[in-house]
Structures are given as structure tokens and as C-alpha cells.
Amino acid sequence: MTRFGFALAVCAGLMLLLASPAARAGDPVAGKKLFVANCAACHGIEGTAVLVYAPSFARGETLDKHDAALIVSVRDGIYRMPPLGGYLTESQIADAIAYARTLRKSGNAAGR
């Protein structure tokens, strides 16, 4: 996919998210099980990336983005990460993101 195509897909996804009712805040307790089952193989159980190209959540990489942008990335896939939208609902994705944010080591501020 070209950069333009990717940018277009992200914009379209964001428009759909913004047009839908406001997403609820993710639940990190519910998100832990989802993260371990769907994310930890690449991002690591403790958020320290297992694969070279996977962001390390322990350092807070990519987690400073707005929830809606992260949900689109997980739902539709990004770079080498496969889309999980066929397996997880947006609510479940929000839960997994909330849990991933708890893996940040102190000193790495959370931003949205």
C-alpha cells in the first residue's frame, strides 16, 4: 500500500469513528486478557517488543496517539501488523489499548 493510500484509509477510518457515537474509555483490566492473546506475541507480555519492527509499549512508542487513531490502526492493520478488526470489536481494541498504556515505564508520559 502506498503512503497516500494508507493516509486515505486512515482518514476514512477516522471520519467513520468521528461520525459514530463517542467511544467509551477502554478498560485495562478487561484489556489484559485481550492483549496477551492478540498482541503479546509481537509486542511482548510486558510491552517490550519481541519483534524488531514492533513498537515497544514499555517505552510508550505509538501510545501517545489519540484513541481513535490507535483503534483504526489495530482494526485495519498498519505496516506489518495484521488487521484485527475481524477478530476484535472496537470496544475490545480500546480495552487492549488501555492495558497497553499501563505497560509504560515511569517517566514516559501518557498523552492522547
Image: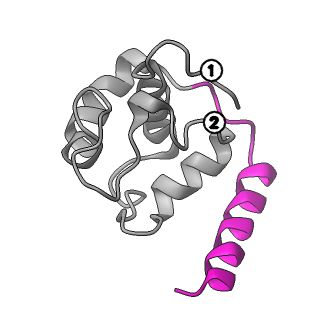
Magenta stretch containing residue 109, yes or no? Answer: no
Q: Is residue 78 above or below residue 45?
A: below
Of the numbered discs 2 and 1, the one sitting upstream in the chain is 2
- The residue to which callout 1 is attached is 109
Nearest to the observer: residue 26 or residue 57: 57
Q: Residue at x 48, y 34 (%)?
A: 97
Three-letter code, disc 1: Ala
Q: Residue at x 36, y 21 (%)?
A: 30
Name the element at disc 2.
loop
Residue 54: x and y, percent? Answer: 35, 53
Three-letter code, disc 2: Asp
Magenta stretch containing residue 9, yes or no? Answer: yes
Name the image quarter holding the C terminus.
Answer: top right
Please report contact status of discs 2 and 1: CB closer than 8 Å, yes or no.
yes
- The residue to which callout 2 is attached is 64
Q: Main secondary structure of the magenta part?
A: helix
Alpha carbon separation for disc pair 2 and 1: 8 Å
Q: Residue at x 39, y 22 (%)?
A: 103
Residue 58: x and y, percent? Answer: 39, 28
- Left or right side of 100 for 5: right
Which numbered circle lies on residue 67?
none
Which segment did they paint magenta?
A: 1-25
